[in-house]
Amino acid sequence: MLSVVIPAHNPRRDYLARVLASLRAQSLPMSQWELLVVDNQSNPPLEGSIDLRWHRRALVIREDHLGLTVARVRGFKESNGSVIILVDDDNVLDADYLTQVCTIASKFPFIGTWGGCIDPEFEMPGIAPPSALNALLTLRQVSADLWSNDPDHHASTPWGAGLCIRREVADAYIREISENPTRASLDLRGKTLLYGGDTDIAYSGCRIGYAKGVFNKLHVTHLIPPERCTPDYLCRVARGRGYSEVLHAYALQGILPQPEALGVSLIMRYIKAALKPGIQRSVILAHYQGRRRALFDLTSKSVT
């Protein structure tokens, strides 16, 4: 059996309705999967305000500790499936998504985490950012199936919408973050934009002997509102990703990364960033700002 887990914090109700409609339309019979909506401190609560009567194995679970990682872990613990599919409250799955997940799970038993293509649907296409910034909106195209057990092989590392996780990997991840709570901060908390939880789960799988992968038959549509297309939001995301990269490395290795010396290489990178067109230049610089801020914060903590 599969478990679909939707962590939701104050979701847009029209988006969530489309997410649930896409699940209701899945080709995989409902007898083969369960649905858990983890209400992560939404106000008003989701219980009683969304209709899940169409699925007899559907449940709304209230989690009052704010944070995406906390909500995911609650979903892991409450679910029963051998494979868990993480679906955000703005992710519309293709109708064959769960069927494809079952096929991949059976055909590739050595892969512990996997994902696929994440396509955009912009509410206002006219203000969509340039495609060079797609990663900031967790958009991804997968031209060919890839897998690897090397954490440094980034092309095969799944992230974003529709992440699939074997039960053994989810259990290992729960154990690891209980021993290293810093890793629980590697993701969104309300309006705080931190990232890295997806890759952290995939790396947990690698540590217990599983590979990770991406597959081009898996497709999710990411619903993107206008406010996520603004330069301010994109820079906030870039800053959060830069911060999270440093925090993730520190959480895993226990060693503070050394600040880069002002050498030729660093100067050339700044020059290349300065030559990028408008918003692309801004997000590159915001990414550097996030990394520097993380180094400052972590160094201050280590001194105190």
Image (cartoon, rainbow, N blue to C red):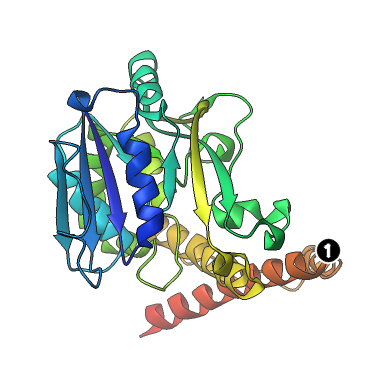
The crowding category of the residue bearing disc 1, from other C-alpha atoms within 10 Å (few below 14, some 14 to 19, many at least 20), is: few
**Residue furthest bottom as drawn:** 304
Residue under the point 35% across and 41% down: 21
Residue under the point 26% across and 62% down: 181
The reply to whether residue 180 is in sight is no
Of residues 204 and 156, which is closer to you in this image? 156
Q: State whether residue 190 is above or below residue 249.
A: below
Q: Residue 106's quadrant in the figure?
A: top left
Where does the image place residue 65, in percent across and percent down from the top left?
A: 20, 68
**Residue furthest top as drawn:** 107
Q: Is residue 283 left or right of residue 184?
A: right
Q: Residue 201's quadrant in the figure?
A: top left
Where does the image place residue 175, in percent across and percent down from the top left?
A: 20, 48
Q: State whether residue 111 is above or below residue 75.
A: above
Residue under the point 27% across and 52% down: 72
Of residues 74 and 7, which is closer to you in this image? 7
Q: Which residue is mark 1?
A: 272
Q: Residue 99's quadrant in the figure?
A: top left
Q: Is residue 246 left or right of residue 107?
A: right
Of residues 230 and 209, which is closer to you in this image? 230
Residue under the point 39% across and 57% down: 14
Where does the image place residue 173, in percent across and percent down from the top left?
A: 27, 45
Where does the image place residue 255, in percent across and percent down from the top left?
A: 44, 63
Image quarter in which the N terminus is found? top left
Disc 1 secondary structure class = helix
Image quarter in which the C terminus is found? bottom left
The reply to whether residue 197 is in sight is yes
Of residues 66 and 210, which is closer to you in this image? 66
The amino acid pointed to by label 1 is Lys
